[in-house]
Amino acid sequence: MKTLIAAFAATIALSTSAQTIERPQFINQLSVDTCSTSPAHILVDTAKTQFDLAHALSFSWIALQTLDTDPNSYDDDKDADLAKAQEQWGLSNIKMFDNQRWNVRAMITDYEGDVFLTFRHTDSNLNWLLNADFGLWNFDHSFALNRKVHHGFATMLGSVWTDVVSELQARTQDGQKVHIFGHSLGGALALLSAPGLKLEGIDVAQVYATGSPKVGSLDWVADANQIMGSTPVYRVTNTQDLFSRIPVGETSLDEFRELFSFIPSIFTGLLDKIRYQMPYGLFGSHVSMVDEQTLVFADALTNDYEEQAYWQGIANQFRDIDENSNNIVDNVQQKAGVITTNLGVHLMRKENDGYTCTMTKLLKAGQ
């Protein structure tokens, strides 16, 4: 009898903890003091595809809690808890797809009658090398759309593509829709995969990518936008996040080149040659977290201008350092500090100004 009572109590607790909560309740449970720790509940209304920062934060936590639990990872997240994602957040039928050669991990899970697909963020030195492999190449995979895409990202996505497509096709036979998301490298793979999945006959409901770099050429972006049609694609960035602004677009190369004014002209000439190999485009609706209270929506053209201003701002900081530093060591240290600061806000769990904390503060401020 005691066993039956305990089992019944556990069932009640599970159904209660995984229940859907309303947006005010979700925001109320968040705390700025604990913004780098995952919340008790998430908020994802699968019927709602208008942009919602609460959805962006919830998707971010799902990715962190589920994909950072690999015991072989060199950077395993101490707060990651797959059981929490299942028991408290309602994820079920979780399946992981790993490619050890390229250190790629994707997860597919059921949630409230629909399907989630997410990709792990950068998790190894190999991932960083592939992130930097930004040449535009042609690939045979459907996600490439017969256009040129980021070589490193496409290599990683291609390593799990067939398995991911097959699993999603099997799970969506009865009309289930797929929600795709990820942060950093995971966001890049989310963006890159979405139009390809549509071509594969999979009903994509929405895409959320936080802190994602650019993933494809201008031609790829044009075709991807046409294929996605009215399906929303949201690219959420911290306005000071350096990683989300690379590869540097053609319109910002002059400003970017100013960062290297101290190197010989032969190398700046190389940058001019790169100019014609960097026709990267911005895919999706752009949502910038400017500060702790301001959320700005921008089209691709406005985002291009903002990117120019961003690189010019760093160039101005470098110029001030050149004029005021005491010696070359001091000069290098100060410039390294500028870059470190702009890379630091890219991190998800960084206290105060990382993505989860910035999103939490914005939600608390009424966004």
Image (cartoon, rainbow, N blue to C red):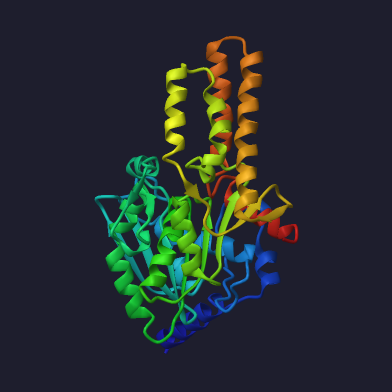
Using residue 332 as the reference point, say whether residue 105 is left or right of it: left
Residue 318 in percent (x, y) is at 61, 23
Q: Residue at x 62, y 51 (%)?
A: 301
Q: In which quarter of the image is the C terminus?
A: bottom right
When asked about the image quadrant of residue 333, the answer is: top right
Residue 197 in percent (x, y) is at 39, 69
Q: Residue at x 63, y 19 (%)?
A: 321
Q: In this view, does 70 lie above or below 29?
A: above
When asked about the image quadrant of residue 41, the answer is: bottom right
Q: Which residue is drawn at 57% across and 43% down?
A: 241
Q: How many numbered marks does the figure carry?
A: 0
Q: Can residue 71 be seen in this view?
A: no
- Hey, which residue is sitting farthest bottom in the picture? 1
Q: Residue at x 69, y 54 (%)?
A: 296
**Near-viewer residue (3 or 322):** 322
Q: Is residue 228 visible?
A: yes
When asked about the image quadrant of residue 105, the answer is: bottom left
Residue 107 in percent (x, y) is at 38, 65
Using residue 289 as the reference point, say whether residue 267 is left or right of it: left
Q: In which quarter of the image is the N terminus?
A: bottom left
Using residue 59 as the reference point, say whether residue 308 is left or right of it: right
Residue 2 in percent (x, y) is at 43, 85
- Hey, which residue is sitting farthest top in the picture? 327
